Image: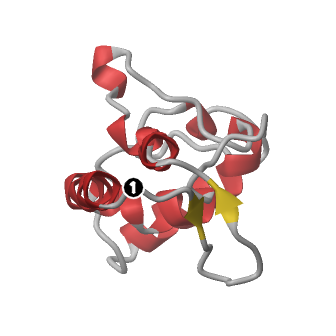
Amino acid sequence: QGGQLFCPPILTKLILDREPLRTLEWVDRVSSRFDFVRIIPGHLNNNVKASPKEFRRAFDVLRNDPMQRNVVNQRPLAEDLALLQEASDLLTRFGVVRQSQVCDLEPARQVGRFASNKF
């Protein structure tokens, strides 16, 4: 991962990309209010050295705008994300979640054995 902080793909694919603006507003509030040097992940198993700027950058994938050719590469690789993309598509199709506002048209839809072009 190059040592960079990133938002776990399972969160961005199945939850956060449904409300990207609200999520990014929260990210901006946290990163502007607190001058932190460490983040404790939700699993409480470690603490990660990170600044507010690095925290903000971890959510850049939510700023994707494929129509404007502004696509931030997500970790892991697109092929690895294809399974999550298929799960997201199924949850959307069955009405469990709303359609993603961010991740449509990204490489995960075209790469790997789980890729689809259904949406």
Disc 1 marks a residue whose amino acid type is: Asp
Placement of 38 over or under 72, stated as above or below: below
Give how far across and how far down residue 12 sits, in percent.
Answer: 49, 57
Drawn side of residue 104 relative to residue 5, left or right: left
Outermost residue, bottom direction? 44
**Where residue 9 sits: x, y (%)?**
60, 56
Q: Name the residue: 60% across, 39% down.
A: 74
Whether residue 114 is visible, yes or no, is: no
Q: Residue at x 68, y 84 (%)?
A: 44
Residue 48, by quadrant, is bottom right
What is the crowding at mark 1: few (fewer than 14 residues within 10 Å), some, or many (at least 20)?
few
Please determine whether, in this image, residue 28 is positioned above or below residue 108. below
Residue located at (61% from left, 73% from top): 40
Q: Nearer the viewer, residue 26 or 110?
A: 26
Note whether 92 is above or below 4 in the view shown: below
Image quarter in which the N terminus is found: top right
Please tell me in which quadrant of the rendered image residue 8 appears: bottom right
Q: How has the structure been colored for display?
A: secondary structure
Total marks shown come to 1
115 vs 80, nearest the viewer: 80
For the point 48% across and 66% down, the residue is: 14
**Residue 43 vs residue 102, the one in the foreground:** 43
**Residue 62 shown left or right of residue 68 in the figure:** right
Asked whether, in this view, residue 57 is left or right of residue 62, the answer is: right
Estimate the x, y position of residue 35 in percent, counting from the top left: 39, 55
Secondary structure at numbered mark 1: loop
* Residue hosting label 1: 35
- Residue 30 x, y percent position in the rendering: 31, 61
Q: In this rendering, does residue 81 appear at all?
A: yes
